[in-house]
Amino acid sequence: RMLLVHYRRYYYSMIDQHKKHSCILPHSQFPIYPTRIRLKKRKIYLIMYERIFVALAVLVVTTSSFSPLPHLLFVRQNQTPILHLYSTSTDPSEMKLREIQAELKDLGVSYSDCFDRDSLTRRLKEARSGKVKKTEPAPKEQHTYPSAESTFDRDATLQELRSLRVKELRTELANRNIRWGNMVEKEDLVQALLAAREAASNFSSSGVLTPGKVSDIDADTLTTELSTPAGTPLLLDVYATWCGPCQMMAPEFSKAAVELGDTVRVAKIDSDKYPDWASKLKVGGLPTVIVFDAAGNEIERVEGALMKDGLVQLARKNV
């Protein structure tokens, strides 16, 4: 642009100079026609340079991610070209949720703490104005759970989850301690729950128990966990809702489950709902904490309430 400005000034100064001399000097003393020819050539060069600069400017504007014009932006993810159709001049309130998320992802701005459309729209406006810094995506932690002899049918589970309602998906995610507030689309809920079920199937035989959490199981689940070999021992709490020591030990049992993580399966069963299992396990007092090995054989039991340290010590010495 500066080159064009200087060249224009030089060109028009030559024209002014030519007009000035042509008015004062006679035709015989000033070569008017050669000067006009030179000026005409310079004007052609000026037009050519202007067209080149305009073409370059249009090329830069149309390929820029901050273009005021609608454009197609190709982004490679995992060596696969993905096409996003959106315009950065469009008002975020008029855009679809997928378009807002795609543009935020292309701008490198995290939206994991945005739980509704208003917060996503506000985040996009801040990202366009440069008020939000780009965030590096944190590498996902890959947990390797001990293998349990269970077959996980991914296709059947995916079909089952897609047939559920959004409310049911959110309820199961909440029961598994998975935050779903930043998942706007139903498919996001389905994929998150599918990954959780697959991880749980590798951790426990029934797929109900999850690492770091106490699962309140039923008779069928306990039968599956004890009859199918697994890679971790099972810490079982036999309790009752009317039992005071059981209620006192419940928060300590949850703390122990968090500390044990994926090294021990932690579960509890209600003796009033399933009296057959209470009699089968020969429970004489409540609460009763029983440790089973990976093959489902009883190793040790303790009657009475235990604190977190006692529960962790009881489980780890049998790992």
Image (tube, helix red, strand yellow):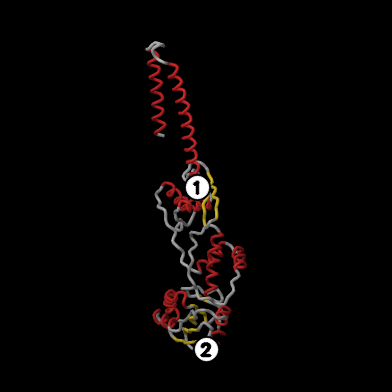
Closer to the camera in the image, 74 or 184: 74
Q: Is residue 239 visible?
A: no
Closer to the camera in the image, 255 or 188: 188
Q: Find residue 224 and report its horizontal and vertical position in percent.
A: 57, 79
Q: Is residue 253 visible?
A: yes
- Give the residue number, with chain letter if any, for mark 2: 282
Give how far apart the Cα atoms at labels 1 and 2 are. 63 Å
Question: Few, some or many C-alpha atoms within 10 Å of disc 2 (few <14, some 14-19, many ≥20)?
Answer: few
Answer above or below: position of 259 versus 109: below
Q: Find residue 128 and report its horizontal and vertical position in percent.
A: 44, 47
Q: Amino acid at mark 1?
A: Ser
- Give the residue number, with chain letter if any, for mark 1: 93
Q: Residue at x 62, y 67 (%)?
A: 156
Q: Which quarter of the rendered picture does the N terminus lie within?
A: top left
Answer above or below: position of 169 versus 133: below
Answer above or below: position of 112 versus 46: below
Q: Find residue 315 and report its horizontal and vertical position in percent.
A: 44, 82
Q: Earlier in the sequence, mark 1 or mark 2?
A: 1
Q: Residue at x 47, y 78 (%)?
A: 264
Q: Amino acid at mark 2?
A: Lys
Confirm or deny contact between disc 1 and disc 2 (CB under 8 A).
no
Closer to the camera in the image, 226 or 102: 102
Answer above or below: position of 112 versus 261: above
